[in-house]
Structures are given as structure tokens and as C-alpha cells.
Image (spheres, rainbow, N blue to C red):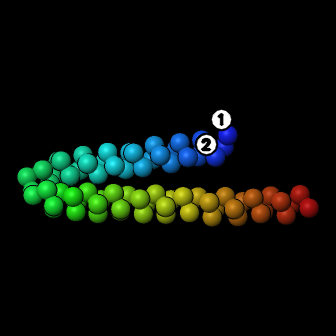
Amino acid sequence: MHTSNKRELLSGIQYLLIGIIAEAVVLRWFGQRPSLQQLLAWTIIAGALSFVRFFILSLSEWTRKDDWQKVSRRNW
């Protein structure tokens, strides 16, 4: 399997988990609210989890980029 296919598959699984977590939270704490409030809560929770995901990915890419530059400078 190509690296890009693995990356796409992992991204899809991550977003699926974000959706499932958001749905579980909505059913647990917002189950008695009207549908529009449930949809709004789900959107906010899923958006917040996606933002956290992007933050973690950018942080890990930033640290990985710095490490790679340090290694390549040592080899030269």
C-alpha cells in the first residue's frame, strides 16, 4: 500500500472517530435538547476536536522538520 493511501486511510479513520466521539457526547449530555441544539453541539464538538487534531499534526510536523534538518546538517 502506498504511503499516500495509508495517510488517507488514517485521516479517514481519525475523522470517523471524531464524529463518533462528538455523537456520543451529544447523546450523553444533550440528548433531551431539541434537534437543532444537538446539531449545533455536535458541530462545535467535532470542530473543536478537528482543531485539536490539526494542532497536534502541525506540532508533530514542526518538531519532525527540525529534527530532520539537524540530522542532514550533521551529515554534510
Relative side of 27 to 51, left or right: left
Relative side of 52 to 32, left or right: right
| Dot 1 amino acid type | Met
Tell me which corner region of the image, top left, top right, bottom left or bottom right, holds residue 61: bottom right
Residue 64 location (% of width, % of height): 67, 58
Tell me which corner region of the image, top left, top right, bottom left or bottom right, holds residue 63: bottom right
Residue drawn at the location 29% of the way across and 60% of the way down: 43
Mark 1 burial class by Cα count in 10 Å: few <14, some 14-19, many 20+? few
The N terminus, quarter of image: top right
Separation of residues labelled 1 and 2 (CA atoms): 6 Å
| Dot 2 amino acid type | Asn
Residue drawn at the location 78% of the way across and 62% of the way down: 70
| 19 vs 62: above or below | above
On residue 55, the disc is: none
Tell me which corner region of the image, top left, top right, bottom left or bottom right, holds residue 65: bottom right
* Residue picked out by circle 1: 1
Relative side of 49 to 53, left or right: left
The kind of secondary structure element at disc 2 is helix
The kind of secondary structure element at disc 1 is loop
Residue 36 location (% of width, % of height): 15, 61
- In the rendered image, the residue lying farthest to the right is 76
Residue drawn at the location 21% of the way across and 58% of the way down: 39
* Residue picked out by circle 2: 5
Residue 58 location (% of width, % of height): 56, 63
Relative side of 46 to 64, left or right: left
Residue 21 location (% of width, % of height): 31, 47
The C terminus, quarter of image: bottom right
The reply to whether dot 1 and dot 2 touch (C-beta < 8 Å) is: yes
Residue drawn at the location 83% of the way across and 59% of the way down: 72
Mark 2 burial class by Cα count in 10 Å: few <14, some 14-19, many 20+? few
